Structure formats: C-alpha cells, structure tokens
Image (tube, grey):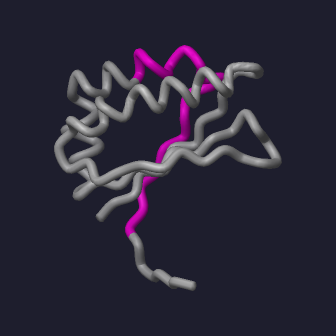
Amino acid sequence: MITEIAQIDVKPGSEAEFEAAVAKAREAFGRSKGFCGFELHRSIEKPQRYRLMVKWQTLENHTVDFRGSENFTEWRGLVGGFFAAPPEVEHTETVLTSQA
C-alpha cells in the first residue's frame, strides 16, 4: 500500500469552496485503478494549507494510471483553480503502525 501525500496551499478565502470541490472529486478518485481511499486534512496553524492523503495499491496506480487518466483531468479541473502554488507531492510506504 502506498500513501500519496500532497501538500496544497489554497488562495486566501477559498477554503470552503476548495473543500467542496474535493468532495465532488471523490467520484473521479473512486473510478481510478488501485484507489483505496483518501483523507483531506486542514492545518490548524495555517488554515490555507491542506494535506491530501490518498491510498493506492501501487505507486504506478497514482503516477501512471491516475495521472494519465481523464479522472486526473477531472480532479485538476475541479480543484486546480484554488491552488495558490503547485502542490508538493510525495509517496510513502508504511513501515510501522500503532493503535491506541
């Protein structure tokens, strides 16, 4: 399992609209090969900063399958206008977990 972590800074005052656009984009993600779910987190200290954490079965499901698809075009069409700067994206693998 791969986690894509995208740090997204949005234009001031567009936070609510951005969140609504991400909610609309659920369908585009849901149609994507290897998609396993996502969470959107908003920073408390920097309320215009978000972290989108997307679970993929493989790295290629994100970098090749999703990025090369109409689903990615739909995603960017819904949310791209809110970006203050290009998102910073990295991928991680879980190496340790803990449960309370």
Drawn side of residue 7 relative to residue 49, left or right: left
| Residue at the farthest right position | 45
39 left or right of 69?
right
Q: Position of residue 19 (x, y in %)?
A: 57, 30
Horizontal arrangement in the rendering, residue 76 relative to residue 27 (left or right)? right
* Residue 57 place in picture, x, y as percent: 23, 58
Seen at 61% across and 21% down, the residue is 17
Report the residue at 66% width, 23% height from top.
84
Compared with residue 90, is residue 74 higher up or lower down, i.e. above or below? above
- Point out the image quarter for the N terminus: bottom left
Instruction: Establish if 23 lies above or below 73.
Output: below
From the viewer's perspective, is residue 74 above or below residue 1? above
| Residue 67 on the magenta span | no
Q: Quadrant of residue 76?
A: top left
What residue lies at 41% left-to-right and 49% top-to-bottom?
A: 38
Taking 79 as reference, is 49 left or right?
Answer: right
Magenta range is: 76-93
Relative to 36, say whether 100 is above or below: below
Q: In the rendering, at what x and y percent does residue 35 appear?
A: 26, 48
Q: How many marks?
A: 0
Q: Position of residue 100 (x, y in %)?
A: 57, 85
Q: In front here: 21 or 49?
A: 21
Q: Is residue 83 magenta?
A: yes
> Which residue is painted at 75% across and 20% down in the image?
13
